[in-house]
Image (spheres, grey):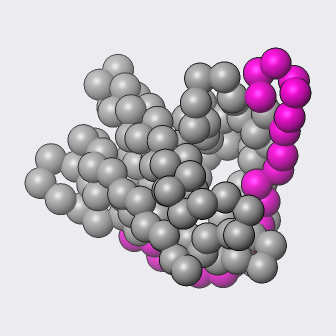
Amino acid sequence: MQITVSTFVAAPVAEAWRAYTTPEDIKAWNTASPDWHTTAATVDLRVGGQFSSRMEAKDGSFGFDFAGEYTHIVPLQSLAYRFGDRTGEVTFTPAPGGVNVAVTFESEPTHSEEQQRTGWQAILDNFARHVVALHAG
């Protein structure tokens, strides 16, 4: 099953794209809750290039790597990737006053659809806040 989450980012598409694909920015926004953080991120933004984000609980109790390979890239428009046996796609659609960003991914069996949707949406909302703060600053 595929799940889609989306958000509106009140900033130019180029700024949203850069923040989504730059390791230092990813470390700033890639968290679903305040008690987690991303401690490391790498991006090789090309088809066949690898990406990885190390997500950890701030208390050190748990951590995991979200990693995969880019399978399709259209700069400033979309990127697709494979992570494990699942796929994902991110689209950047210009809109008045900013850009709509949507992430579609294949669900996994361990967590409910609602848990997955809520977690990915929280991360995307953090992304939007991060980009808007950069744009305003």
Quick one: which residue is furthest to the front in this view? 112
**Measuring 57% from the left and 56% from the top, which residue is drawn there?**
116
Residue 7 in view, yes or no: yes
Determine if the magenta segment contains residue 71. Answer: yes
* Residue 63 x %, y %: 84, 38
Q: Which is nearer the eye, 76 or 71? A: 71
What is the quadrant of the N terminus in the image? bottom right
Q: Residue at (86%, 34%) from the top-left corner?
A: 62
Q: Nearer the viewer, residue 67 or 46?
A: 67
Return the x and y of residue 65 as percentages of the image width and height: 82, 50
Q: Dividing the image into 4 quarters, which one contains the C terminus? A: top left
Identity of the residue drawn at 12% across and 54% down? 96
Give the magenta part as a residue range.
Answer: 57-81
Residue 40 to residue 13: above or below: above
For residue 93, above or below residue 56: below
Q: Main secondary structure of the magenta part?
A: strand
